[in-house]
Image: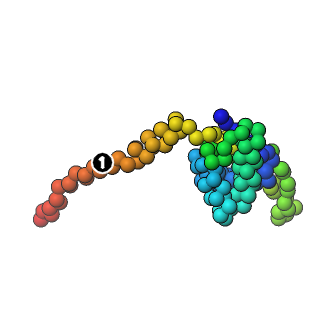
């Protein structure tokens, strides 16, 4: 079962929001909440509110357990851009683009397939990487 929550027209650029959401992608919701509470980014507050909203939707609308949820997908897309102008020298003006974001989060319940995928990733990481030895260069001799 999957639960979707959206926050539209957040007055923050998508680039700044992506720094925060990349940290919590794939985490379980309890760990993601803790991570967002202690993060020193302004974008952490709207992302935390959206996460709490998605958790409440899952518990109330679908009778899902909070402990069994993970952040399966989270995206920050660009919203409408507010255009303003600032004065410059010699009577000119320059544009200011105030960007907005649309944040979408998809929560999923933990299942055996998710656990299998996570163990496969850890197996790949556990294998040692082969190191190639550099070929020895012939010694350079000076001739007179």
Q: What's the residue at 83%, 50% (across, down)?
A: 82
Callout 1: few (<14), some (14-19), or many (20+) C-alpha neighbours within 10 Å?
few
Q: What's the residue at 69%, 53% (across, down)?
A: 17
Position of 21 relative to 41 (above/below): above
Q: Is residue 4 left or right of residue 109?
A: right
Residue at far right of view: 91
Q: What's the residue at 79%, 53% (across, down)?
A: 11
The front one of 20 and 12 is 20
Q: Quadrant of residue 124?
A: top left
Q: Is residue 74 left or right of residue 49?
A: left
Q: In the structure shown, which secondary structural element does the residue marked by tag 1 occupy?
A: loop
Is residue 71 visible in the rendered structure shown here? no
Q: In the rendered view of the protein, which quadrant contains the C terminus? A: bottom left
Q: In which quarter of the image is residue 110?
A: top right
Residue under numbered circle 1: 130
Position of 135 relative to 89 (above/below): above
The front one of 120 and 66 is 66
């Amino acid at each position: 079962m999957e639960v979707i929550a959206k926050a539209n027209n957040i007055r923050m650029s998508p680039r700044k929001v992506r720094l925060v959401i990349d940290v919590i992608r794939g985490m379980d919701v309890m760990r993601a909440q803790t991570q967002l509470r202690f993060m020193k980014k302004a974008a952490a507050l709207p992302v935390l509110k959206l996460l709490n909203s998605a958790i409440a939707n899952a518990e109330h609308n679908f009778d899902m357990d909070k402990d069994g949820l993970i952040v399966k997908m989270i995206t920050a897309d660009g919203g409408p851009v507010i255009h303003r102008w600032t004065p410059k020298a010699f009577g000119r003006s320059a544009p200011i683009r105030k960007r907005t974001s649309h944040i979408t989060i998809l929560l999923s319940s933990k299942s055996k397939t998710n656990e299998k995928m996570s163990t496969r990733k850890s197996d790949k990481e556990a294998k040692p990487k082969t190191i190639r030895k550099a070929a020895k260069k012939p010694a350079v001799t000076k001739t007179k």
